[in-house]
Image: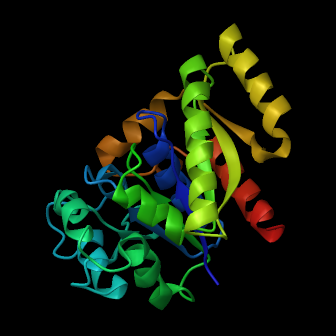
Amino acid sequence: MARIFCVANQKGGVGKTTTCVNLAAALQQAGQRTLLIDLDPQGNATMGSGVDKGAVEKSVYHALVGLATLDEARAVSPSGGYHVLPANRDLAGAEVELVDIDRRENRLRDALKQANGDYDFILIDCPPSLSMLTLNGLCAAHGVIIPMQCEYFALEGLSDLVNTIKKVHANLNRELKIIGLLRVMFDPRMTLQQQVSAQLESHFGDKVFRAIVPRNVRLAEAPSYGMPGVVYDRNAKGAQAYMAFAEEMIERVKTL
């Protein structure tokens, strides 16, 4: 059975898409059958996987509103080898259309039932807001991976996200839990980042992943080539960190 994880944070620019794309590629390299679902209308995870969002005929939008099956809509990342359920601007219209559809918060969960045996990991890249799309992701998932920067404002947003996850767990998805916090864009030279990192470890304990993703130019360059960083330059420090994170995820899933 596939393990389904949302990569979510209500704060923008914290590395959700970078984490999704690189984790998907690293898991695929580790022999795990992986599907990446792009739930953001900007389609950055789609483009970062090497799939042209402007050329796809079927997307996650069609799967959500019942116009296509997951099998019809998915594509393959040419560089990463994992499957992608792509997104483009069509997805922005899904917010409005879902309002009048029955079980609107469970549309993604229903669409994924047909693919449960096809994958070991399904990763969902959520938009940076608590929208109907994010709610669909949270309702479909077994757990949430929270990428965050070790900065003061990130801690403020984290408490809001934790409360949201608790509400979804209580009212819509009893399986949902926080899998862990991933420290990204980390600069060990900054005292504040070290302090926030220590605070996270003391407060969340083993919920904080051991892997830490540093600020890395090669990771930032990779999307412009339509490639995950772990494929673009697997020897870069950022790529090595995501490969370590993938191994940690594989181990953590065994204990769930």
**Which quarter shows the C terminus?**
bottom right
Residue 229 shows up from this direction: no
Depth order, front residue of 11/99: 99
Q: Position of residue 235 (x, y in %)?
A: 60, 41
Left or right: residue 255 compared with residue 10 = right
The image position of residue 138, as x and y in percent, is 51, 62
Q: Nearer the viewer, residue 99 or 93?
A: 99
Q: Residue at x 70, y 9 (%)?
A: 191
255 versus 205 height, above or below: below
Q: What is the x, y in percent for residue 57?
A: 16, 75
Query: Count the marks: how many?
Result: 0
Q: In which image quadrant can residue 108 be found? A: bottom left
- Is residue 228 rendered to the left or right of residue 145? left
Residue drawn at x 52%, y 60% as measured from the top left:
25
Q: Quadrant of residue 148?
A: top right
Q: Residue sitting at 70 percent across and 49 percent down?
A: 180
Q: Position of residue 83 (x, y in %)?
A: 42, 72
Seen in the image, is 248 located left or right of residue 230? Answer: right
Q: Is residue 188 above or below residue 216?
A: above
In the picture, which quadrant includes the N terminus? bottom right
Residue at the image point whose x is 62% and y is 35% from the top: 159
Given residues 256 and 246, the one toward you in this image is 256
Left or right: residue 122 versus residue 126 is right
